[in-house]
Amino acid sequence: SQKIEQNSEALNIQEGKTATLTCNYTNYSPAYLQWYRQDPGRGPVFLLLIRENEKEKRKERLKVTFDTTLKQSLFHITASQPADSATYLCASGFQKLVFGTGTRLLVSP
Amino acid sequence: NAGVTQTPKFRILKIGQSMTLQCAQDMNHNYMYWYRQDPGMGLKLIYYSVGAGITDKGEVPNGYNVSRSTTEDFPLRLELAAPSQTSVYFCASSFSTGEDQPQHFGDGTRLSIL
């Protein structure tokens, strides 16, 4: 069955730096990958979607890449701010989304 | 628009009790989903529905039941609560089920079974 894997260890970075989160997929060749943000005590919120042939997609300070050779998507937040601290989830799937466990990002002032 | 609304936000149940988690959406989405989220385990799909009157099992359906009598509502029922069902439950909806369709989530119901 398809698997979505994310680094379970928290990522700690300083304000102003670029945060890079990784999502790997196995047993599956998705046509799209989705990224969500989840704050403590809240439900996930959709951020970005990237298609397999797009390679890169940007939205304000967010950038997502899709490497079908490495079976990986990278999620970048440039000029990070403490308000970016949250857990970020990667997801993919046809008819039923499969979610990764998420990576917690902590941005220190 | 309220989006996806879940009630209650918190609940403590005793083993063997039953309860219904409510979910309503006002986006006229045909597709609705129930997930549970346990620490370090990610979101697991319990049940989903592709429209009023149509439901299907997800990855972890045992111990739960659902119904979908209207487009707006998708309640999740626990008949005989067990400690293993202690979790955070999220309801979500989407316009369709394509890989390019984002899901809209409620803020969850935190359920403890003692």
Image (cartoon, coloured by chain):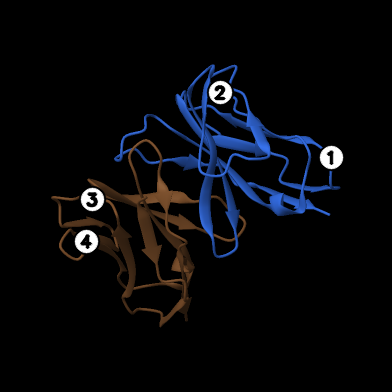
- Residue annotated with mark 1: B17
Both on one chain, marks 2 and 4? no
Both on one chain, marks 3 and 1? no
Q: CA distance from mark 2 to mark 3?
A: 33 Å
Residue plotted at (60% across, 47% down): B107
Q: Tag 1, which chain?
A: B
The amino acid at mark 3 is Ser
Residue plotted at (76% across, 53% down): B83
Question: Which mark is on residue A29?
Answer: 3
Residue plotted at (26% across, 47% down): A32
Residue A25 is situated, as x and y percent measured from the top left of the image, at 31, 59
Marks 2,3: beta carbons within 8 A: no
Estimate how packed mark 3 is, as few (under 14), some (14 to 19) or many (20 or more) residues with alpha carbons within 10 Å: few
**Which circle's residue, 4 or 3, is located before the other in the chain?**
3
Image side of residue B39 versus residue A97, left or right:
right
Residue A67 is situated, as x and y percent measured from the top left of the image, at 18, 61
Marks 1,2: beta carbons within 8 A: no
Q: Secondary structure at mark 2?
A: loop
Both on one chain, marks 4 and 3? yes
Q: CA distance from mark 3 to mark 1?
A: 43 Å
Instruction: Decide which of A15, B82 is in the foreground and name it.
Output: B82
Quarter occupied by residue B29: top left
Quarter occupied by residue A90: bottom left
- Residue annotated with mark 2: B72
**What chain is colored blue?**
B
- Residue annotated with mark 4: A65
Marks 2,4: beta carbons within 8 A: no
The amino acid at mark 4 is Thr
Residue plotted at (84% across, 42% down): B16
Q: Nearer the viewer, mark 1 or mark 4?
A: 1
